[in-house]
Image: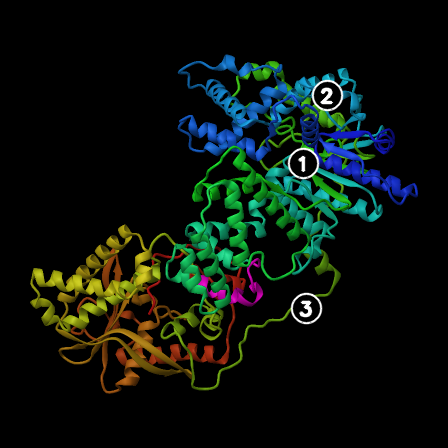
Amino acid sequence: MNVLLPALADGAIAVTPNRRLARRIHAEFDLALAASGQRAWLTPVILPYAGWLATLWESLLARDNAAEPRTLLSTAQALALWQRVIEDSGAALADPRGAAALASEAWSHVHAWGAGGESWRSWRQEGDQQDPSLFAAWADAYRARARRLGVVDMAQAADAIAARAALIGPDSPPILLVGFSELTPQQTRLFTALEQAGATLREVDSLPGRDARVSRTTAATPRDEIAAALCWARAIAIERPGARIGIVVEDLAERRDDVLALAQDILDPASILPGQSRSGAPFELSLGVRLAQVPLVGAALDLIALSDAPLMLGAAATLLRSPYLPEADALWQRHAALERRWLEQGVRTIALGDAIAAIAPYAPELAARWASGRDALRAAHATTPREWADLWRGWLTAAGWPGSRVLDSAEFQARQAWEKLLAQFASLGAVTPRLGGGAAIAALRAMANETLFQPEGSHAPVQILGVLEGAGLDFDALWVAGLSADRWPAAPRPNPLLPIAWQRERGVPRATAQRELQYARRLTERFARAADDVVFSSATGIDDPPLSPSPLVLAYPQAPQRCEAEAWSDSMALSVTLESLADDSAPPLPPGSAIRGGARVIQTQSDCPFQAVARHRLGARAWPSAGPGLAAFERGMLAHATLAAFWSAIGDRASLLALDGDRLDSEIAAAVGKGVACLPATRWRSVPGAVRAAESRRLNRLLRAWLEIERARPPFAVVAVETQRALALGGIALRIRIDRIDALEDGGLAIIDYKTGALDQPAQWFDDRPRASQLGTYTLAQRAAEPGVSVRAVVHAELRTESIAASGLAADRAAWPGLMHVAAAGRFADWRSLELWWAEHLGALAAELGSGVATVTPRLKPSPCRICRLQALCRIDSVRFEEPEDNGAA
């Protein structure tokens, strides 16, 4: 730097291999001049290599009046041109965009590492479908199309500039090549041509000569390795304020999210607090996220996609919850309630018209804006990329994007990146004059996914970098992580579109193991002198045998791991005396208070007191999930409704026995039709046709099988279907809905509860915490409604595809043959004893709920946590169970 900074002050141009080194040199230049007492100075010219080529090209076009003007394509334009060439070639490819990216890389390798000619032509063989031959055909077509369009891409630019270097060289200021670890043959040709034309070029090492202290260390796991590096960086930052600290991670692109989470936890724990700005963070993480993943840009992309076609429910709900819509803070709860309704209705996709109609009742202004924007879209016609970009800008403005609040620094930069993306998309018109709506949106989203976004770098003391970004930078302290023998040097990964022999001969990056060894050795040596204190590390891993450090770092002395990571939560807990409070009681209810939930209230209190309070007193509901077909509770609803419809029409056993084959078919079909109608029409239409047909067949089979059991019963008459009963129990008031009540021919009643899930057998009903308490609750409610009429049987009708059965208790054999006699249960002498047991135990559960008992004490077996789905509220340390086939609700 001692040579570089004065040369820049004298007007030299610095060319770097990447933008990060260019920014670093800019910052050091400014600091040096400010320290010398100057208050103003000319901005030095410091450019990454690609940017420098672009300036040379513009200069060449301005000087060469005789040459035909040719546009220099951007990366996005070149990729679009490659995609058009590949799609027009007729090749059967699953991912033309991915093939275009691979072909573009191969094209760059051919020019950067080739001898400067059209070497790909020799690889083409007519009729040959091998990858190199296919690429050669694409390359010919690409080159021909570029010539017709009058364009040249960055891969060709250096050779084109070298051919006319005489127009640039004599007037060029000194050129300093800073931080290049190696030069490609194409770069060498360009630099030689410029020198021969009179330009002055000089290579400058970006790393100062120093006697560095280098050591190596290991950690048990990759996570422990990064945590140790971050703790080490934190200690240095505290001990030496102002020190420049670097952490280079070999596989940062793969582990970015994990590294970021650890860095926030160890270096910036305050970042977890709401409303914290990232502008003052003590670290900066390179390798930004895909632009499409930035929330502000993602909202814009989804708004544009919604204007053209329906969005999947998840994407539509995320868009409505976005803070980048008008009045987001005031409407988010309404939007969340709307999402719940969509989920419960089984909606899978949301069109713009659906969204407008849904939000209009509670957000009329937003609905009006969207409707106005939709009308403008329908009236507009766009075909060229520029017209599409202008149309999208107008739609986003009409839709209210990016919201009402002031954007912070990172969001403002994201919006600038979005505008730059739209400008790049508009520039595709140079190679793709016409695009349909769907193709235009797909191209825009692809470009957003291929563009990395990272807010402009701060002067944070800790820089977390990838290998390529860290190469060439100097620090006060540097830790290089991930240097295990299996990853450093990296495994070869040659480009499949280029002949392997050609890549080996030319020394193309990633082509051979020898090439990767040389490259890794060169970078290791540069890292070893990039700071006064350098640590190389690797993880031993958790597999057998353990991983070894890379042979390239074994020569350095081994040091013990510098420190153990301590989570911020542990630090906080150890710094204060914590108090614990057992808060497992809700306020007691006034006597006679009504609680909604029917018979399920008592069963839930038996399953887990906390669940009962949360669900039936606080109104907590699990967030609905969107499955591919009908939910279990919906299949239960359909079965209940079908049985209710059938017996409402038939009425008694005698009428059932009188039905002949055709009439029975007709009555069953009518019942199934009425049962299906219990679902909202919008929900039923959202179910795939095959699922609807299969569900109708299932209901038909279930009803037929259950009717065979009904035929074998003694005579009965159905006296109530889906009837309501009031019950005062344990100081609370309940409204009970009973699926069905039958009057028996010889007196008394039978209560039937339809179940489409697995059942508890009668022997299991009378545990200390009663199971299957619904029938007991129904019996008590019926007794309260008609004290003079006895209940003689209680039955669970098991209605599952794999099992159709009646399970329950009967007061005597005549009531319902086949059911367990109450005396056979082994606990009660007669039916009256059974009812008294229910009144005592179920009443105690009701009294618990009314008094506020809310302990998190679920029954052990079977655990109600399987179907509760309120674990986010109770925070119990339970496993995540799959929801059973059905929870046939009472």
Q: CA distance from mark 3 to mark 1?
A: 44 Å
Residue lying furthest front in this view? 66
- Identify which amino acid the numbered label 1 is placed on: Gly
Residue 638 image point, x, y percent: 27, 63
Q: Which residues are magenta?
A: 323-340
Residue at x 68%, y 58% (from the top left corner): 276
For the N terminus, the quadrant is top right
Q: Quadrant of residue 110?
A: top right
Residue 379 lies in magenta, yes or no? Answer: no
Residue 81 image point, x, y percent: 51, 30
SS at mark 2? Answer: helix
**Who comes first in sequence, dot 1 or dot 2?**
2
Circle on res. 167: 2
SS at mark 3? Answer: loop
Q: Are marks 1 and 2 in contact (CB under 8 Å)?
A: no
**Who comes first in sequence, dot 3 or dot 1?**
1
Residue picked out by circle 1: 466
Residue 115 in sight:
yes
- Identify which amino acid the numbered label 2 is placed on: Leu
Q: CA distance from mark 1 to mark 2?
A: 38 Å
Residue at x 56%, y 68% (from the top left corner): 330
Residue at x 65%, y 21% (from the top left corner): 66
Residue 335 lies in magenta, yes or no? Answer: yes
Circle on res. 579: 3
Residue 68 image point, x, y percent: 61, 23
Label 3 neighbour load within 10 Å: few <14, some 14-19, many 20+: few
Circle on res. 582: none
